[in-house]
Image: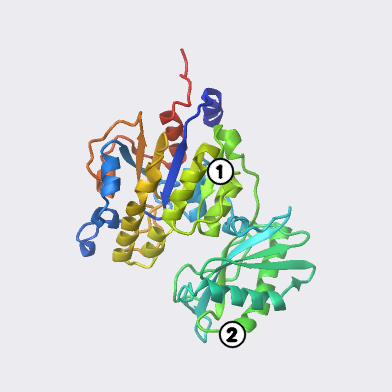
């Protein structure tokens, strides 16, 4: 029997409240340079410590052993969708999060403003993390001068800091394409290519991207530091089963960055706008508590500082999160999971394949008798090491949402 079909057959409707709190890129490595501590282990987290004493812990593999996930696969796994089965381009996710009403056939690309040297070599993939206001100005400049390429409409939307989205709207287009991003400094931007060399729609799309670069780069040439850009996640929107139909839970999303709002919308979560800090997100959770069954709450800064290789800042971000946690616990959900979508070790300055820690708290979780929530402690927790796609099922089980299987 198909496993998802079995879960659906066993699912019971309850009045339980579930919350999935994601500290993006939470997982890390205990290296000699960091005193053999991860940021989570070095952080002062009295509220997480108290919670851990009545919780189960473990580690999760976001996709498969050795595979480093992007944020899209990392979160889809947490939402219970096998990221190998449901592959979504990052551009689609970002476009949805920015409020773009996508039409059938639209192809989306997620882009970063970047710094290029005179030879076109990428010297900073994020252009020094320019301010959002600068990003908006540059996007407006591009939009004013590039409205169409041939028979294709070009839609450019600014995001947070250095991020923006380009939507290509026309006939005969399709993704996915390879990335126009070397994924590290010191290399030139590679040309995009069709994932399927025989697909004529992908070939047309690859030519469009090349033409867009030819039109856009001269417009940015005199800008500092954002005189170039990178594009990745170039794809069209796939069909994905709705979260509420799949789990019998009415879901809501509390996220600040557009990409994570887009991921939530992709599976049918209601996007709650307004909150800009983790404190405000938790306060809004209290206000919306009676309106939804499932809350996805996203915290970005652990990932941001991990990518910067800034151990002290990642540690401080965890402490800031911990200081706000009592707000959420004023209306403790029946099931609470706290984890990351992947690991972003400071030593690697990027996402990695290492399993991320997870804490699961409910009346049924029991206690692993661990005084703290840490990467090392999670290794010996009762949840063990398991694929992230099963977290939502464990949350449902802890909410007593499954009937008994078999006689």
User: Compared to 201, does 358 lie above or below?
Assistant: above
User: Compared to 208, does 324 lie above or below?
Assistant: above
N-terminal-most mark, 2 or 1: 1
Which of discs 2 and 1 lies nearer the camera? The answer is: 2
User: Compared to 214, does 193 lie above or below?
Assistant: above
Q: Secondary structure at mark 2?
A: loop
Q: Residue at x 42, y 47 (%)?
A: 21
Q: Nearer the viewer, residue 336 or 112?
A: 336
Q: Is residue 329 left or right of residue 234?
A: left
Q: Can you give x and y, in whole percent of width and height, for residue 74 in the image?
A: 47, 50
Q: Can you give x and y, in whole percent of width and height, for residue 85 in the image?
A: 56, 43
- Image mark for residue 85: 1
- Image mark for residue 124: none
**Where is mark 2, residue-wise?**
221
Q: Is residue 285 left or right of residue 102?
A: left
Disc 2 versus disc 1: distance between alpha carbons?
40 Å
* Neighbours of disc 1 within 10 Å: few (<14), some (14-19), many (20+): few
Q: Residue at x 50, y 81 (%)?
A: 225
Q: Nearer the viewer, residue 66 or 149?
A: 149
* Neighbours of disc 2 within 10 Å: few (<14), some (14-19), many (20+): some
The scheme the figure's colours follow is: rainbow
């Amino acid at each position: 029997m198909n496993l998802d079909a079995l879960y659906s057959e066993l699912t019971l409707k309850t009045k339980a409240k579930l919350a999935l709190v994601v500290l993006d890129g939470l997982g890390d490595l205990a290296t000699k340079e960091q005193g053999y501590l991860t940021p989570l282990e070095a952080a002062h987290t009295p509220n997480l410590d108290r919670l851990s004493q009545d919780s189960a812990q473990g580690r999760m593999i976001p996709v498969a052993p050795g595979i480093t996930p992007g944020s899209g696969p990392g979160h889809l796994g947490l939402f219970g969708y096998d990221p190998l089965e449901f592959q979504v381009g990052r551009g689609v996710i970002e476009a949805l999060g920015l409020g773009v009403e996508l039409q059938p056939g639209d192809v989306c690309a997620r882009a970063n403003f970047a710094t290029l040297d005179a030879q076109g070599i990428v010297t900073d993939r994020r252009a020094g993390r320019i301010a959002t206001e600068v990003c908006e100005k540059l996007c407006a400049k591009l939009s004013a001068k590039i409205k169409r390429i041939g028979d294709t409409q070009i839609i450019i939307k600014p995001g947070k800091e250095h991020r923006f989205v380009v939507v290509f709207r026309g006939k005969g287009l399709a993704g996915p394409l390879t990335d126009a991003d070397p994924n590290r400094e010191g290399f030139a931007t590679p040309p995009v290519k069709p994932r399927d060399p025989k697909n004529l729609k992908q070939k047309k799309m690859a030519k469009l991207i090349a033409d867009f670069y030819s039109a856009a780069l001269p417009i940015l040439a005199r800008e500092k530091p954002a005189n170039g850009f990178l594009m990745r996640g170039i794809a069209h929107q796939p069909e994905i089963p709705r979260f509420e139909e799949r789990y019998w839970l009415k879901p809501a999303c509390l996220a600040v960055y557009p990409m994570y709002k887009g991921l939530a919308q992709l599976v049918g979560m209601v996007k709650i706008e307004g909150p800009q800090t983790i404190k405000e997100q938790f306060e809004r959770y209290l206000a919306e508590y009676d309106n939804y069954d499932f809350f996805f709450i996203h915290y970005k800064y652990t990932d941001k500082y991990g990518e910067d290789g800034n151990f002290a800042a990642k540690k401080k971000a965890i402490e800031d999160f911990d200081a706000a946690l009592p707000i959420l616990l004023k209306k403790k959900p029946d099931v609470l999971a706290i984890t990351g979508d992947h690991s972003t070790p400071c030593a690697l300055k990027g996402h990695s394949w290492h399993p991320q820690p997870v804490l699961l708290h409910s009346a049924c979780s029991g206690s692993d008798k661990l005084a703290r929530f840490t990467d090392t402690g999670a290794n010996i927790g009762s949840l063990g090491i398991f694929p992230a796609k099963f977290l939502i099922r464990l949350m449902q089980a802890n909410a007593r949402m499954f009937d008994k299987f078999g006689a």
